[in-house]
Image (cartoon, helix red, strand yellow):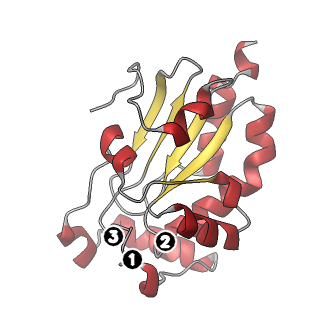
Amino acid sequence: MVQVGDQVPALGADFSWLWASRPALVVWLRHFGCRFYPEMLTELRDALPQFDEFGVNVRAVVQGDKAEAKQFCGALGAETLCIADPLRRSYNMMGFERAPLTSVLFPSKELKERGREVRTKGFKQDWKNTFRRNGDALQLPGAALIDKRGIVRWLYRGGHAGDLPPVTTLLSIAKHHGARAHS
């Protein structure tokens, strides 16, 4: 399992270019039906100028093929942010776990509260897309900051479906580890 300070595993051609010239913040999202997916993706999209100012590339890994990524991410105006991983290989390589089925059937108080929070922002569960062919409704999210040498400098593994740091936290991480911070 990857830890902070480790060389990031070979995640494939769609990834290594991200940190070739400057650090990259990569966020692994849940399936396209998840209410937390559009919330995080739109917030990342809106914060792109700030990430760029800190000298950090930002991308979101999604559980779908390239056509699905183009469709779903494009609908949120974030097509260029998404990297397709239909087999979820990068999720596995980074050590992002799957939730137990019981956590979906009997969500924790924390997950229920997080769900209410995103519903107030207008994001809803899309049941039609929850069980798509290239998605895993039990896959948990995660995030990592990877430096130009491919070393993991910060790593977050979600403990439940809605467990990703807020974009304000991700921006703080980017500011601290970004290319501009070390130039």
Work out how far the residue at label 1 is from the one at label 3, CA to CA, in angstroms.
9 Å
The image shows residue 147 at horizontal and vertical percentages of 56, 23
The image shows residue 85 at horizontal and vertical percentages of 44, 54
Foreground label between 2 and 1? 1
Tell me the tag on residue 7: none
Q: The C terminus lies in which quarter of the figure?
A: top right
Task: Looking at the picture, tell me which residue is in the foreground, 33 or 88.
Answer: 88
Foreground label between 1 and 3? 1
Residue 41 against residue 118 in the figure, above or below: above
Secondary element at image label 3: loop
Tell me the tag on residue 137: 3
Tell me the tag on residue 32: 2
Quarter-wise, where is residue 100 in the image? bottom left
How crowded pointer 3 is (Cα within 10 Å; few <14, some 14-19, many 20+) is rated as: many
The image shows residue 98 at horizontal and vertical percentages of 26, 57
Which residue shows up at 37% across the image and 64% down it? 110
Residue 29 relative to residue 76: left or right: left
Q: Earlier in the sequence, mark 1 or mark 3?
A: 1
Query: Cβ–Cβ below 8 Å for labels 2 and 1?
Result: yes
The answer to whether residue 95 shows anywhere in this view is no
Q: The N terminus lies in which quarter of the figure?
A: top left
Q: Earlier in the sequence, mark 2 or mark 1?
A: 2
Tell me the tag on residue 132: 1
